[in-house]
Image (spheres, rainbow, N blue to C red):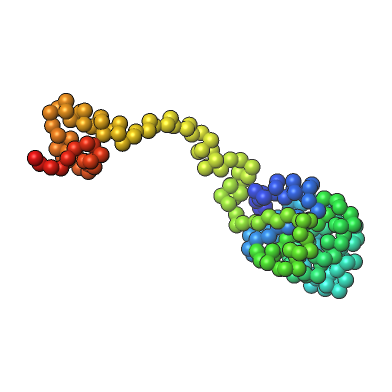
Amino acid sequence: MTTYFERELASTVFSALKNMLVVIVTGPRQTGKTTFLQHQFRPQSRRFITFDDFAQLSAAKSDPDRFVSSGEVLTIDEAHKCPEIFTAIKKVVDRKRKPGQFLLSGSANFRLLKGITESLAGRSVYFEMRPFSRKEITGRTGKPSFLERFFAEQTIPKRRPRWSPSRTSSGIAASARLKGTAPFQTLRSCGVTLNLPVLGFSTDSN
């Protein structure tokens, strides 16, 4: 039996279905959208349809209004293959504004289809499914990632004092005077480039 890996996106989609009329999951091919819809959402609560099935696709194209007006809560995979259906979905959700009526999936260019974005504007929310993450493969969904744990455990370092050029210059000059050596002679050996006018020294050898 093939192992199903819990997807990080699941909790977000569940929450959206409680608040939005139409929820759409997009993403590149072979990222697990179909498997996600089949396994993550119980078939007894939603009717699953895929437009990879030619018979279903043909029925939707021939009479889209009837296809989505059965009153059932629908999950439609590869919905972008039937653009005609989106206007029909708009009519349904406008008549009965019940959250979670439609859960759709489609390819990465889903939002580029003009008819879709116009029909469902203000009625839908989009989520992108990406390829499996390490957290999903290792069964750590819902737990903080390495970076999240790392930054949560760090303490904010104390701010370093800010030094103004005048205070820094005065300190260098005072230290040099105590040693009886010109500042540029003292620090040149350390590889420090000095701005002599800032320090108050002249380059005039006289």
Q: Residue at x 83, y 54 (%)?
A: 101
Query: Who is closer to the viewer here, 137 or 11?
Result: 11
Q: Residue furthest left?
A: 206
Left or right position of 81 against 163: right
Q: Quadrant of residue 22?
A: bottom right
Label count reads 0
Quarter containing the C terminus? top left
Residue under the point 79% across and 64% down: 119
State which quarter of the image contains the N terminus.
bottom right
Taking the spot 83% from the left edge, 72% from the top edge, the residue there is 61
Q: Position of residue 90 (x, y in %)?
A: 83, 61
Vertical position of residue 87 compared to residue 185: above or below: below
Q: Foreground: 62 or 157?
A: 157
Q: In this image, 96 relative to 146: left or right?
A: right
**Residue 37 makes an appearance in the image:** no
Residue 177 visible in image: yes
Asked where in the image residue 176 lies, by quadrant, the reply is top left
Is 24 left, or right, of 193 in this rendering? right
Residue lying at the far top of the rendered structure: 178
Residue 129, percent across and down?
Answer: 65, 56
Residue at 78% in and 70% down: 82
Residue 150 pos. (x, y %): 50, 38
Q: In the displayed structure, does residue 115 sit left or right of residue 109?
A: right
Depth check: 54 or 71 in front? Answer: 71
Q: Quadrant of residue 30?
A: bottom right
Q: Residue 69, relative to residue 149: is it above or below?
A: below
Picture coordinates of residue 201 (x, y %)? 19, 37
